[in-house]
């Protein structure tokens, strides 16, 4: 069975902090991984696709790295608008799967 | 500009069939993959399935026995049918586009569905 493990589940941080969220896949997925930001009452917003590509219009403080089974989303300097829940999402064998989510809270 | 808009019943009873429609504007339904995703209250995102005009439809294995998706080319819409609903199907349902980037770049605003007797 394919598993995606996202960590941490909650993260407390301050404005200006560097923040890192990790997703691990039980099988290699190459670069088939995306990251989303989700705020209550709104649709999720894609930040990164194909592991490292910044979606159009997304601020440069967001970056993605990794391939195979381990992936990272980094926010270089956390801004007030960045407090939200973040999800990774993989694509393998024609199927999509989301991680459990990481809630980024104000410290 | 690409826009997606979900429409559906809002409130349902257990054992009924949920039917949702996603209307696409600013893009042709014959392009790309079109998806349904849901989020229960307090829970995470769950992919339900994907439909394409020429490629085999794919469903989440956990829902495959109850789900059907289709495209209406004439209305530029795609639909979701989920039968035998229970309270566990209560969620906000989103439609979303995958422009062959293995990710979802455009989403609808989401429509809440509550299953209650």
Image (cartoon, rainbow, N blue to C red):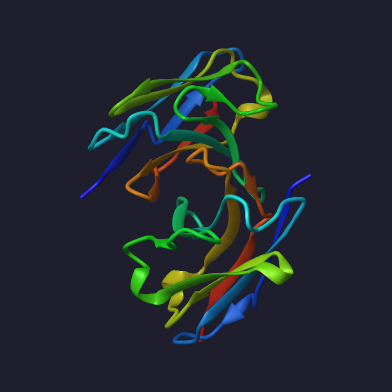
Residue at position x 44%, y 55% from top? B46
x, y percent for residue B33: 54, 52
- Going by the picture, which residue comes out furthest to the left? A1
Question: Where is residue A25 shown, x and y percent of the image?
Answer: 28, 35
> Relative to A49, is B58 on the left or the right?
left
Residue A107 can be seen in this image: no
Residue that lies at the very extreme toward the front in this rendered image? B54
Q: Where is the C terminus of chain A found, in terms of image quarters?
A: top right
Q: Considering depth in this image, is A82 or A30 the residue closer to the camera?
A: A30
Residue B34 drawn above or below residue B77? above
Image height check: is B9 above or below A57?
below
| A84 displayed left or right of B61 | right
What count of labels does the image hold? 0
Residue B67 horizontal/vertical position (percent) = 43, 73
Choose between A90 and B101: the one closer to the eye.
B101
Please give left or right for residue A95 compared with residue B116 in the image: left
Residue A24 location in percent, x, y? 30, 32
**Quarter where residue B84 is shown:** bottom left
């Amino acid at each position: 069975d394919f598993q995606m493990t996202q960590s941490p589940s909650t993260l407390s941080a301050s404005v200006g902090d560097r923040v890192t969220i990790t997703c691990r896949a039980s099988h290699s997925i190459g670069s088939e991984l995306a990251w989303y930001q989700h705020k209550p009452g709104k649709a999720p917003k894609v930040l990164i696709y194909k592991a490292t590509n910044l979606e159009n219009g997304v601020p440069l403080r967001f970056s993605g790295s990794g391939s195979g089974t381990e992936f990272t989303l980094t926010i270089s300097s956390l801004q007030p608008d960045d407090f939200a829940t973040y999800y990774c999402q993989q694509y393998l064998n024609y199927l999509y799967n989301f991680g459990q989510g990481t809630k980024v809270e104000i410290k | 500009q690409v826009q997606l808009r979900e429409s559906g019943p809002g409130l349902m009873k257990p054992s009924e069939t949920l039917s949702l429609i996603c209307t696409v504007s600013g893009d042709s339904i014959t392009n790309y993959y079109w998806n349904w995703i849901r989020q229960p209250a307090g829970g995470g995102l769950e992919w339900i399935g994907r439909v394409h005009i020429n490629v085999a439809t794919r469903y989440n294995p956990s829902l495959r026995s109850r789900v059907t998706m289709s495209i209406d080319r004439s209305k530029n819409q795609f639909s979701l049918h989920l039968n035998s609903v229970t309270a566990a199907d209560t969620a906000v349902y989103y439609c979303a586009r995958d422009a062959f980037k293995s990710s979802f770049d455009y989403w609808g605003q989401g429509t809440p569905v509550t299953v209650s007797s």
